[in-house]
Amino acid sequence: MVKDVEKWGNWITEQLKNDPEIRELYDDDVAVYIGTWEVKCPHCGRWTPAVGNFWLARVKDEKSYKRLAYMKVEPNGEVRIIDLNEIFADVSRAKVSTERGEIVLEGKGYVEKVKKAIESGKIKEEDVKIEGSKVVFRVPKPNIEARKSQLVCLSCGNVIKYVDEDGNHYIEKPRGRDVDFYVKFALKKYHEGDERFARQRLLVKVKVKNKDLIFEPATREDNEKLWKAKEKVREMLEKGDPDVPSEKVAYYQLQPPANFPTLLHGMDTWDKYFNPRQLLTLIKIVRLIRETGKRIEEEKLKEGWSEEKAFEYAEAVATYLSMAMLRYMDFNSVTNHWTISWLFPNQTLASRGITMNWNWCDVYFNVDMTGTFKRFLRSQIRALNYLTSALSSSQRTLADFTENSVKVLQGDATSLNLGEKFDVIVTDPPYADDVPYTELSDFYYVWLKRALSDVENGKLVPRFHKEAFFKRIGPKWVEIKTQWQEFAKKEVSTNPGRFMEDGNKKEKAVRHFENLFSQAFISMREHLKDDGILVTYYAHTDLESWITLIEAGWRKAKLQITRAFPLGTESSQRVTARGKMALDTSVVVVWRKKNEEKEVWASDLEEILTEVGVKSAKEFLSYGHHGLDLLYGVMASVLSEVTKYKAVKSPKGELSVREILERYVYPATINGIVGAIAEDVKAEMLSREGIFYTAYKVLFGNAKVSPNDIILLTLATAVDSSSLLKLEILKKVNGELTLYSPDLLGKKALDTRELQKFIKERDAEKYRNAIDVLHVLEHASLLGASRVKEIKEELKKNHPTEVEEAIAIARLVASYYKNVYSIALGIKDEREIMKRLEKDGLYEVILMDRLIKAVRGEML
C-alpha cells in the first residue's frame, strides 16, 4: 500500500505538471509567490497594496543574523528587493531593531560594499544612509493597521480610513452614518463580484537555488497568470461546477473562540479563501485523486481481488493522497502568511482560527520545500512506512489482513455503546472555549468530501467514506453540506455562536458544554471494567476547567482519582516560563471506579489535605518539577484525596465542587508546596502576605500571571488582590498584575543605586510587612555582609518578626531555585546556577542568595 501511495502520488504530480492549464499558470523555477490585496486609493485613484510585513527574511540563530532581506514598494507600484546577503554575503554583525525598522552594520568594508551596490544598481542611494563607518537600512513599516481601520496609500501617502455604503470616503467617522473600514468594504465588494475597489496582487516570487532562497519582484506577467486563472474559475462558477467548494462558512464566528475576521471581509464561502490559481490547482488535484481511486479499484479487480477488498484498498490509498492534499492546502491559501524567520509559508490554521493576512503565499505544488504537495506526499509515505512496520511486522500488504489488531471508530463520546468494556481508556478532554473544531474543520471537510466522493449529473454522490459526507434519509443519500450545520451542537465545547437564536446564548453554551462533558465521563465509566482505569491528560490553568473536570469525573460519573502526576511534554531546558505562564507538562490524572460510597466532614478533611499537599510536593520537587507543573501536580494529588469520598459535608450541608476547591484544595496545594520547601530548609512562614510572596516567586518567578493564577493564590492564602496592591506587593503593569519585586528592574536590580530608587518608590522603608524588610535587606546584601548585619540588627529592634520572616522567605526561595536548577538542568556548580538565574532574569533570587550567605557569614 505504501508503494501504491507513492506511485499514485507521483502520478498525480506528473499529471499536474503536464496539464496545459496548470503549466501556463506557474513557472517551474518559482517555489512561492508572496501576494496580498490591493485597493484603489480614494485620494489618488491608483492601486495600492496592503502590506502587513515588508520583511522577507530575518533569520537568526543564538549568536547572530544569518539572512536579512526586505522589499520596498515605490509610488509607481514597482516592487524592489533589498537583500543584504546579496550585498554583503555575511550579515552576522548586523544589529537589527524591529521596533525602529533599522538594520545597522558598522565597518569600512560595509561602507565600500554599499557604494559598489549603489554603483551596480542593486540598490538606490535612498535605500541606505551612510554615517561615517556605519550603514543604516530602514525597513518600511506595515502600511495597514486593521485594528485602527487605517491604510496608507503607497502611491500618494494619504491615509485611507472609512467608507459608507455608497463608497464615499471619510478620514473621520461621520456622525449619523454607518461606515466601515475602506479595506473591508473593498474586499466585500470584490467577493460580491464588484472588482472596482479591490484585487489580488503578487508582490514577490521566491526561487530555490542550491538550497538557498532568491527573492525577486513579481512581474506583470506573473500577475497576468493569476488573472488568467480567474477567468477559468469564473467559468466554473457560472456553470455551477460541484468541485468548487461554495459551502457557507459559519456565519456566527465573529467572536471568541477563534474569531473569523475573514467574514467581515466578505469571505463567507470556502472558495473565497483561495486565489484563482490556488483554487484551480486544488480542484485539479481533487479530480486526479478521484480518478486514482477508480484506477486502483479496476487494477485490483483485474488482479483477482474481491470487489469488497478492491474497494477498501482504493479507499485507503485515495484517503492518504487526500490527506497530503489537505496539508498542501493548509499552506496554500490567501489567509496564510510568509514566515520571515523560517523562510517558508505558514499554515492557514496556525493561529487556531482563520485570520486576515496581508502577505499570503501561493505555493507551487512540485517543489521540494515545506508547504508543497510534493513535500507532503513524501511526509505521508514516511509516516505510513512507520505505521505499517510498527503495527504489522508479519503482514506485508492490506490483502494479508484477516483481523485488524487496531480498530479506529468514529463516534460521539457522549453516547457510545460499543457493547464491551475496557481495561484502560485514555483521553485528553476538550477545554471549554479552546478551539471551535467543527467550524474550523470545514476548511478541510469541503475539499475532502470532493476528493473522496464522485460526481454524477453535476452533483456530488457517495463513494468513499460515504457516512462521513452523506446521511441516509429513507432510500436516498443526502449530502452533508458542512460540519457546522450538521454537528456543531454535538461538539463538547463552549461556543455561544451556536446558540444565536437564544437570548441567553452565553449561559446556554456553558450549560451545554458542562452537560456534554459530564455525559462523556458517564459513558466512559460505563465502558470501563470494574478494575479498569481511565486516564485523562489535562494541561489547563483555568480554574473553571478544573471545576468542570472534577464535577464530571467525581460527581457525575462517580469516579475517584487514584494517582496524579505531571508528565513532561516540553523541553526540560525551560526552567522558567520567561513572561509566558504555560504548563510545560500535562497533568496525568488516573481515575477508577469507587469501591465504597462514604462521606467526610470538611473539618476532618482539611488536616488530611494539608498532609497530602506537603507529601506530594516533596515527591514532585525530588523529581525536579517546578512552576505550574508543580502547582497543578500537587493540586491533582490533593484532589485524589477529596474524590475518595462521595461528598464533603459541613454544618450547612454538602459542599459544592467550587466550595471544596476554593476553601480546601487551593490552600492545601499552596501551603503544601511552601510547607515542603520550608521543612526542607527549616524555615517557617508567619504571615499570609509572606506565603503569597513566596508562592508567587516559587511558582511564577518573574513573570506576569493570568487573572486565574492570582485568584488561585489569593484564595489559597486568604488575602485579596486589592490589599496586595495597596501594600505594593502586587503592581499593575499594562493592565496585568505582577509581583512588585526587584525583578521589575531587570539587570538593574543588581545595581545598588537603582535598587535604592526601587525601595523608595515602593515606600519599603515604612516596614509595613516582611516584604518591605526583605527588599531593604536585599539592597544591603549588595553592600556587603557587614552592612547586612548592621541593618538587620537595627531593624530587629522594632520589627523582629518581619526580619525573621524576610530571611525565611529568602532562604525558602533561594533554596528552591538552587534545587530546581540542580535537578532539572543537572547544574551542580553554584556559580553556574547563579549565571543561569541571571540569564533567566531571576535577579531577586540572586539577591536572596546573597542575603542568606551574608546572614550565615559566608560573604564578606
Image (cartoon, grey):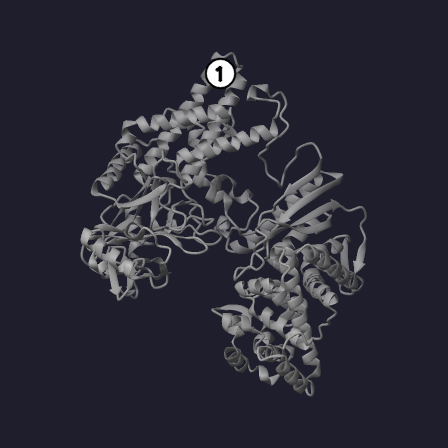
Instruction: State whether residue 760 is above or below residue 174.
Output: below
User: Which residue matches tag 1?
Assistant: 300
Picture mark count: 1
Q: Quadrant of residue 583?
A: bottom right
x, y percent for residue 399: 56, 19
- Left/right of residue 452 with respect to residue 276 in the rendered view: right
User: Toward the viewer: 172 or 856?
Assistant: 856
- Left/right of residue 415 with respect to residue 193 in the rendered view: right
x, y percent for residue 56: 33, 50
Placement of the C terminus among the 4 image quadrants: bottom right
Residue at 35% in and 26% down: 14
- Left/right of residue 815 with respect to residue 115 in the rendered view: right
x, y percent for residue 441: 47, 41
x, y percent for residue 704: 53, 65
Residue 465 in view (yes/no): yes
Residue 170 in view (yes/no): no
